[in-house]
Image (spheres, rainbow, N blue to C red):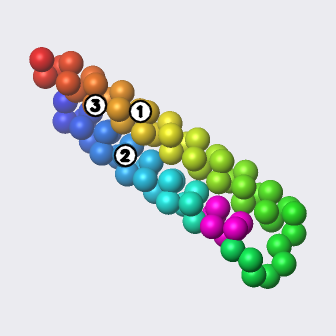
Amino acid sequence: MKDLRAKVNDFTCYGYVLLVLSVFLYIGVLIPGEEKSWIQIDTMMITTLIFLALSFDFFRLAIQYKKEINELEQ
């Protein structure tokens, strides 16, 4: 039970960190400044999408473990 709660905490933190990183990269694409090459923009957008997908997956795992904890408590 204690191990599951630790996993929920960890996965939630990982999800938030990846979400913040993806927003940071997306803002880097939107803000005009130095001339960025298409390779840089594409790399940042692909990385943003990967981070968003991983964030979603970590939040999904956290919800799954929360449900498992609730079933064990009943």
**In magenta segment, residue 27:** yes
Picture layout, residue 5 above or below residue 43: above
Pick the front one: 14 or 38 = 38
- On residue 38, the disc is none
Decide if residue 17 is on the left or right side of residue 22.
left
**Is the Cβ of the residue at disc 2 closer than 8 Å to that at disc 3?**
no
**In magenta segment, residue 3:** no
**Disc on the earlier residue, 1 or 3:** 1
Instruction: Sort mark 2 into few (<14), some (14-19) or many (20+) by Cα contacts within 10 Å.
Output: some
Picture layout, residue 44 above or below residue 28: above
**Disc on the earlier residue, 1 or 2:** 2
- On residue 12, the disc is 2
Decide if residue 50 is on the left or right side of residue 12.
right
Pick the front one: 8 or 1 = 8
Part of the protein shown in magenta: 25-30
Q: How far from the left and from the top, in percent, is residue 36?
A: 83, 73
Circle 1 residue: 61
Pick the front one: 4 or 34 = 34
**From mark 2 to mark 3, how far is it between C-alphas?**
11 Å
Image quarter where the C terminus lies is top left
Q: Can you tell which quarter of the image residue 23 is in?
A: bottom right
Q: How far from the left and from the top, in percent, is residue 59?
A: 42, 39
Q: How far from the left and from the top, in percent, is residue 65?
A: 32, 29
Label 1 residue SS = helix
Tell me which amino acid carries mark 2.
Thr
Instruction: Sort mark 3 into few (<14), some (14-19) or many (20+) by Cα contacts within 10 Å.
Output: some
Q: Can you tell which quarter of the image residue 35 is in?
A: bottom right
**From mark 1 to mark 2, how far is it between C-alphas?**
9 Å
Circle 3 residue: 66
